[in-house]
Image: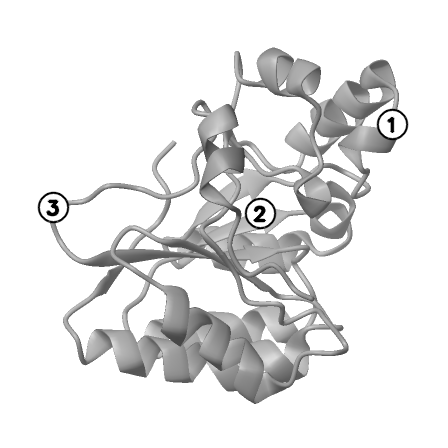
């Protein structure tokens, strides 16, 4: 069973984490993990531009190192970026020193004070350490665009059904997620734009 939203008791245990964002206007905060990826990221950027939507891209450092031109396209289009580690390490299973070194390496390629742990896996100790330097961002809604057992239609439904003003929504600009994100994203934007929503970057 895919957990689209974190249970409230879990969120309450980590009040310093950004799960959603309060705003005076109905707004959504679209985020894209694991890029930049050739072709896919460009298509995502094109869709966002069609709706004048801004988003936050949590980039893997090694992908930015390989594709700096795509990263520059993200920034020049007015989107925000965040550190998503250099090599997509799982914080739960990585020694702290190795984990912090990986994040620091990513920071050479992704200059940002936003951080999202890969897989959402971060220990309380790592959280306390990293919050001195970063705004730690998790999410309100996981679209499951990366999951083999989720159809494009279900991916769309996950977002449409659960999104509320201030929701932080996770998509992926990765090859694995490409079919589903490219199906769901324009439909999400159309649906919520028609309801008067704004699509904003996560503030640092």
Mark number displayed over residue 94: 1
For residue 52, say whether it is visible: yes
Would you call the spot at circle 3 few (<14 residues within 10 Å), some (14-19), or many (20 or more)? few
Q: Nearer the viewer, residue 182 or 45?
A: 182
The x, y position of residue 196, in whole percent, is: 14, 71
Q: CA distance from mark 1 to mark 3?
A: 39 Å
Looking at the rendered structure, the secondary structure element under dot 3 is: loop
**Above or below, 141 relative to 45:** above
The x, y position of residue 8, in whole percent, is: 45, 41
Say which residue label 2 marks: 58
The x, y position of residue 193, in whole percent, is: 22, 75
Horizontal side, residue 70 vs residue 105: left or right: left
- Numbered disc in front, either 2 or 1: 1
Classify residue 198 by image quadrant. Answer: bottom left
**Above or below, 84 relative to 77:** above
Q: Identify the residue at horizontal 75%, vertical 46% (top origin).
A: 65
Task: Work out which quarter of the rendered image holds the C terminus and state it.
Answer: top left
Q: Identify the residue at horizontal 63%, vertical 74% (top origin).
A: 40
Q: CA distance from mark 2 to mark 1?
A: 20 Å
Say which residue label 3 marks: 24
Looking at the rendered structure, the secondary structure element under dot 2 is: strand
- Which numbered disc flags the more N-terminal residue, 2 or 1? 2
- Which numbered disc flags the more N-terminal residue, 2 or 3? 3
Horizontal side, residue 152 vs residue 190: left or right: right
Would you call the spot at circle 1 few (<14 residues within 10 Å), some (14-19), or many (20 or more)? few
Q: Nearer the viewer, residue 33 or 108?
A: 33
Mark number displayed over residue 23: none
For residue 113, say whether it is visible: no
The x, y position of residue 166, in whole percent, is: 29, 50
Q: Nearer the viewer, residue 161 or 18?
A: 161
């Amino acid at each position: 069973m895919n957990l689209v939203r974190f249970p409230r008791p879990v969120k309450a245990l980590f009040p310093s984490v950004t799960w959603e964002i309060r705003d005076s206007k109905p707004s959504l905060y679209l985020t894209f993990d694991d890029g930049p990826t050739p072709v896919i990221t460009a298509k995502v950027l094109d869709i966002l531009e069609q709706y004048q939507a801004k988003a936050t891209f949590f980039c893997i450092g090694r992908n930015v190192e390989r594709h700096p031109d795509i990263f520059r396209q993200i920034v020049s289009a007015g989107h925000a970026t965040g550190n998503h580690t250099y090599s997509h390490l799982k914080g739960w299973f990585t020694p702290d020193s190795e984990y912090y070194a990986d994040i620091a390496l990513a920071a050479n390629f992704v200059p940002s004070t936003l951080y999202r742990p890969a897989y959402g896996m971060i220990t309380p100790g790592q959280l306390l350490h990293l919050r001195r330097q970063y705004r730690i961002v998790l999410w309100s809604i996981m679209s499951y665009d990366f999951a083999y057992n989720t159809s494009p239609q279900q991916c769309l439904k996950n977002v449409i059904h659960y999104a509320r003003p201030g929701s932080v929504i996770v998509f992926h600009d990765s090859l694995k997620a490409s079919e589903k994100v490219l199906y769901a994203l324009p439909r999400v934007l159309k649906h919520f734009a028609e309801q008067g929503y704004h699509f904003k970057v996560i503030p640092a």
